Image (cartoon, rainbow, N blue to C red):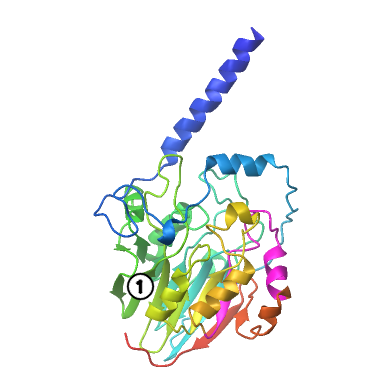
Amino acid sequence: MIAIIFLTIILVFLVSMIFGGWLFSAPAYKGPVSDHFDGKQFINYGGVKAKGLKEFFKWISTGEKRPKWEYVDASGISQQIEAFNEQGKARLYYVNHSSFLIQVNGLNILTDPVWSEYASPLQWIGPKRMRPPGIHMEALPSIDLILISHNHYDHLDLSTLKKMASEFGPKIVCPLGVDLFLRKEGLSNLHVVDWWESVTLSGLEITATPSQHFSARGMFDRDRTLWCGFLVQTEQLKIYYVGDTGYGNLFKQIGERLGPFDLSIIPIGAYHPRWFMSPIHCDPAQAIQIHHDVRSKQSIACHYGTFPLALDGQNGPVEELQGLPEYREISDQFIVLSEGESLEVSGTKNEV
């Protein structure tokens, strides 16, 4: 009898996992084969692959101690943010994780906006927000444009997107296939781009750049939609949002093809253990190398300290970054902002 009950529990658990994996899976992109799409799945340059379930279970079974995270309260910006429209300049506000408000040419742009408490399909389990957003949602100016780099929950937050769409009706730029999920969820005004493809919106040229990552929202949609970074370009400014990525030679290619950049937003966290995370997340030393590869005049760190996604800890990424000898040489160029802190950047005339 006990054995039957035990087997029943296991069966119910497995069925629930499979059903949940199917339920949360996003629609798959269908299109012509390319150098990064094999007709079924998207592929990183060089064939670099994210680790799978086998390696994941190996990781969690090692017993490596998880660094303790504590909720860090911060007031954030609660008063309405003013418009910004200075010729040849941009202003950036750090929300946290990978969410930034970029003000340029009188427009307000958000990168991967996430205001939810959990980076998860369920708002009671999963990676929990350990720092509040640096900007209260009600303090945001009218949002004109949203850039979505890929469909992971810490970058594509459906609840936040629906609130933005209802409040502001922004244009949304996303990589191949992500639009299928967004349309399914009732979102519109979508602009879809492949790697190296550009779209001109409200006088800005937005170019999707390669990154080294993967995609999935459930168990059955692995790599069925694309991931990317974005270049936001005006006649005088080039702002590069790297997205979520591991390190690879692609950044030298991006720098040669599209650089130099006036400002880059580069991830530094969720990189440990390296044997598991290195294909998809760069470490602080590699973040500095990206800064050099793309020939960025200035860079801002992101993707750390908000959601516990790996074992580098809450403060580890920043501490490791600032402790590197190569960082001391560029500490005035590679900036770490606090939530709600802003930075102005000036550019020189670029060919659009």
Question: Which residue bears the numbered disc 1?
Answer: 207
Query: What x and y, as percent, mark residue 214?
Result: 46, 54
Split into 4 quadrants, where in the image is the N terminus?
top right
- Does 315 appear in magenta? yes
Q: Which of 351 and 102 is in front in this view?
A: 351
Query: Residue at position x 32%, y 63% from top?
Result: 194
- Does 112 appear in magenta? no
Q: In this view, does 53 lie above or below 134?
A: above
Query: What x and y, as percent, mark residue 126?
Result: 60, 45
Split into 4 quadrants, where in the image is the C terminus?
bottom left
Q: In this view, does 204 lie above or below 245?
A: below
Query: Residue at position x 30%, y 74% from top?
Result: 201
Q: Which of 157 and 137 is in front in this view?
A: 157
Query: What x and y, as percent, mark residue 350?
Result: 37, 89
- Residue 80 visible in the current orientation: no
Residue sticking out furthest to the top: 1
What range is drawn magenta here? 297-322
- Residue 27 sits in quarter: top left
All told, the count of numbered labels is 1
Q: Is residue 243 left or right of residue 59?
A: left
Q: Residues within 10 Å of mark 1 (few under 14, many from 20)?
A: many
- Residue 333 sits in quarter: bottom right
Q: Nearer the viewer, residue 180 or 352?
A: 352
Q: Could you tell me the amino acid type at mark 1?
A: Thr
Query: Residue at position x 35%, y 74% from top?
Result: 206
Query: What x and y, as percent, mark residue 243?
Result: 48, 65
- Residue 340 visible in the current orientation: yes
Q: In this view, does 41 lie above or below 243?
A: above
Residue sticking out furthest to the front: 46
Q: Is residue 54 left or right of residue 321?
A: left
Instruction: Identify the secondary structure beneath mark 1.
Output: strand
